[in-house]
């Protein structure tokens, strides 16, 4: 059973950002089409901040199932497959590909994720058609919708001023670097955002509050609105210009009533 038209309109109206409304409208249309035609439909690549919300919404559809995939196990941006519940998940094959991008690192400075993304968008490609870009030493892997991956393969010649080579990458044979994390156990007075962010990224409480006011701090890819927001175990913390971390575990309390927590910062 699909959502009623008036419920859809009310839901879409609740999203203030036009791009979020457009994305949600497309996903709802795909869910309706899957139910009506008994077919598998695929969304564009969706950012982590919206993935959970969309999954929860799609669970309201009786007779449908979903599956996420972004090209590799640790992918952040993922496509969602929407399909009738009688179809086996193992029979779902996502229409995505991977492109290897390399350059001669002896004659240029390292190319950043932003550089790769900017040059790919410069080809006239929509952001939703491109998944994660994993930047490594002298190379990168770009995940994209299959037809877009083929287009990048044929048309990307430079990233910024640097000449690059592209080649088709086999998703099943990829060996991507493991994400490394520096882990430490510390004590904090509370699980407030300004306290935990400061502990993870090494900033003072006042510095962290300034960063939060400037909307530079995010939890699970959603901007933190208040320094008093509570961070939960398992939350992913991001700081623009400061990297990413995680509240791994909340332990007991010390004799002075401070919380013992385990945090990690990706390196």
Image: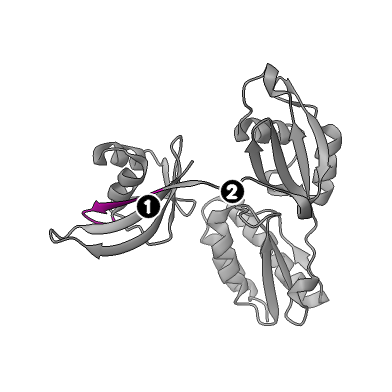
Local packing at callout 2 (Cα closer than 10 Å; few below 14, some 14-19, many 20+) is few
Q: Secondary structure at mark 1?
A: strand
| Above or below for 149 versus 111 | below
> Where in the figure is residue 223, as x and y percent of width and height?
43, 49
Kindly tell me whether residue 210 is visible in this rendering.
Answer: yes
Question: Taking 123 as reference, is 73 left or right?
Answer: left
Across and down, in percent, residue 9 comes to 59, 66
Which residue is painted at 37% across and 61% down in the image? 249
Residue furthest to the top: 107
Q: Are marks 1 and 2 in contact (CB under 8 Å)?
A: no
**Of helix, strand and loop, which one carries label 2?**
loop
Q: Which mark is residue 117?
A: none
Whether residue 124 is visible to the viewer of this picture, yes or no, is no
Quadrant of the image occupied by residue 190: bottom left
Task: Name the residue: 64% across, 28% down.
Answer: 111
Magenta stretch mostly in which secondary structure?
Answer: strand
6 vs 260: above or below: below
Residue found at the far left of this picture: 256
Q: Quadrant of residue 210?
A: top left
Residue at the spot 83% in from the left edge and 38% down from the top edge = 167
Between disc 1 and disc 2, the foreground one is 2
**Residue 127: % across, % down:** 68, 44
Q: Does 183 appear above or below 242?
A: below
Instruction: Give the label on residue 263, or none.
Output: 1
Say which of 239 and 57 sits in front: 239
The local crowd at label 1, few if under 14, some if 14 to 19, many if 20 or more residues have their Cα within 10 Å, is many
In the rendered structure, which segment of residues is drawn in magenta? 183-191
Q: From the image, tell me which residue sits under label 2.
A: 178
Q: Residue 33 in the image: x percent, y percent? A: 77, 70
Mark 1–mark 2 distance (CA, rounded to whole Å): 18 Å
Decide which of tag 1 and tag 2 comes sooner along the chain: 2
């Amino acid at each position: 059973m699909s959502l009623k038209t008036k419920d859809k309109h009310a839901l879409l109206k609740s999203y203030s950002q036009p791009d979020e409304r457009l994305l949600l409208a497309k996903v709802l249309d795909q869910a309706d089409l899957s139910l009506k035609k008994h077919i598998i439909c695929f969304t564009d690549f969706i950012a982590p901040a919206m993935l959970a919300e969309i999954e929860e919404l799609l669970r309201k559809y009786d007779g449908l199932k979903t599956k996420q995939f972004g090209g590799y196990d640790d992918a952040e941006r993922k496509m969602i497959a929407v399909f009738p519940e009688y179809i086996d998940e193992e029979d779902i094959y996502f229409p995505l590909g991977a492109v290897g991008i390399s350059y001669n690192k002896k004659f240029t400075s390292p190319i950043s994720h932003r550089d790769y993304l900017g040059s790919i968008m410069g080809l006239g490609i929509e952001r939703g058609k491109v998944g994660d870009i994993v930047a490594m030493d002298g190379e990168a892997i770009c995940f994209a919708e299959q037809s877009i991956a083929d287009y990048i393969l044929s048309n990307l010649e430079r990233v910024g001023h640097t000449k690059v080579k592209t080649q088709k990458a086999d998703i099943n044979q990829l060996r991507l670097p493991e994400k490394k994390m520096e882990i430490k156990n510390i004590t904090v007075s509370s699980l407030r955002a300004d306290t935990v962010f400061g502990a993870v990224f090494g900033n003072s409480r006042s510095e962290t509050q300034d960063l939060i006011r400037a909307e530079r701090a995010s939890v699970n890819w959603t901007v933190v609105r208040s320094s008093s927001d509570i961070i939960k175990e398992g939350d992913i913390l991001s700081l623009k210009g400061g990297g990413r971390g995680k509240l791994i575990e909340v332990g007991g309390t010390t004799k002075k009533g401070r919380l013992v927590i385990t945090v990690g910062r990706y390196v």
